[in-house]
Image (cartoon, rainbow, N blue to C red):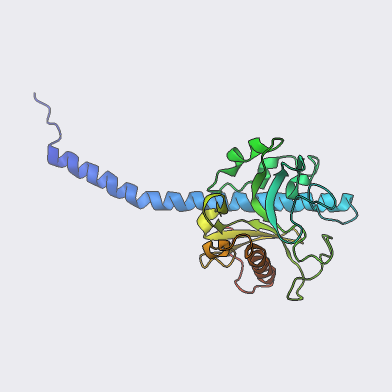
Amino acid sequence: MRTRGFTLIELLIVVAIIALLASLLLPAMSAARARAKHSACMSNLRQVGLALRAYADDHEGHLPRGAAVPSPYVPDDFASNQIWSAAAQNRCGLAIMPPRFLPFTRILFCPADRNSNEHNEMPKIGTDQDAYGSYLYRNRDDLTRPLLDAPGVNGEELPVCALAMDINSFGTGTGWHVNHDGKRVNILFCDGSVSGFDNRDHLFSIRAEDFIDYPTRIPDRLDEILRAADRGYRGDPTPPESPNE
């Protein structure tokens, strides 16, 4: 008895159905991966917050300030994501915290970092190249007092609340550094809490136009970003998003 096989038309129909199902499932899977990376990023920043608390408790309440005190290599008038200074041959910014406070340097890299900094930048630590993490650290920007529990006020005379956040920079070359496709940003606050915000309007981004006459405009733009983050802690300009969204 001859077994009947599939006709060409039937095979094409099956392939079309599979393609349709894949087109429906892939966006959902992509969104699920984005949510997972967003949650992992928030977890990283919470661990950074715990490390900053431990560091402050061990250093009379002070925050890490750079590769040296005072640091001639790390700008002290605006925030930075630099974690290794080739000139100083020392860790700086958030990476200055010793292993007993921050046991894994990879915590300083967002899983949604489009620059793959964990793989590109970590090997530079200890070399003659500067290294950069995924999170913008306030360092001493707008801090009238470099103390975790009393960091002072910002340029708007509002209490400083934000300490570290996803960096989203839309320049060219080394000036392009994007986390979460630039659409979201997680912010670590002084009390150790972490909140996610919508960034599709680039409220928390260094925009392409900010690189005109580089670096003249960058400090002011970073200052604007950090002030917006401080206001965000109080629900203005945008309410925090749920990490489960």
Residue at (65% x, 53% y) in the render = 135
Q: For residue 142, what is the image quadrant?
A: bottom right
Residue at (56% x, 53% y) in the render = 175
Q: For residue 99, what is the image quadrant?
A: top right
Pick out the residue farthest to the right. 60
- Look at the image and tell me in which quarter the N terminus lies: top left
Nearer to us in this view, 194 or 179: 179
Q: Please state the horizontal and vertical placement of residue 181, each as a whole percent of the image.
A: 50, 55
Residue at (46% x, 53% y) in the render = 31
Q: Is 150 displayed left or right of 107 in the figure?
A: right
Pick out the residue farthest to the left. 1
Nearer to us in this view, 88 or 201: 88
Q: Is residue 221 above or below residue 85?
A: below
Q: Please state the horizontal and vertical placement of residue 184, each as a whole percent of the image.
A: 55, 60
Number of numbered tags placed on the structure image: 0
Pick out the residue farthest to the front. 213
Q: Please state the horizontal and vertical placement of residue 104, each as a whole percent of the image.
A: 71, 40
Q: Please state the horizontal and vertical placement of residue 193, each as a whole percent of the image.
A: 71, 60
Nearer to us in this view, 154 or 10: 154
- Look at the image and tell me in which quarter the C terminus lies: bottom right
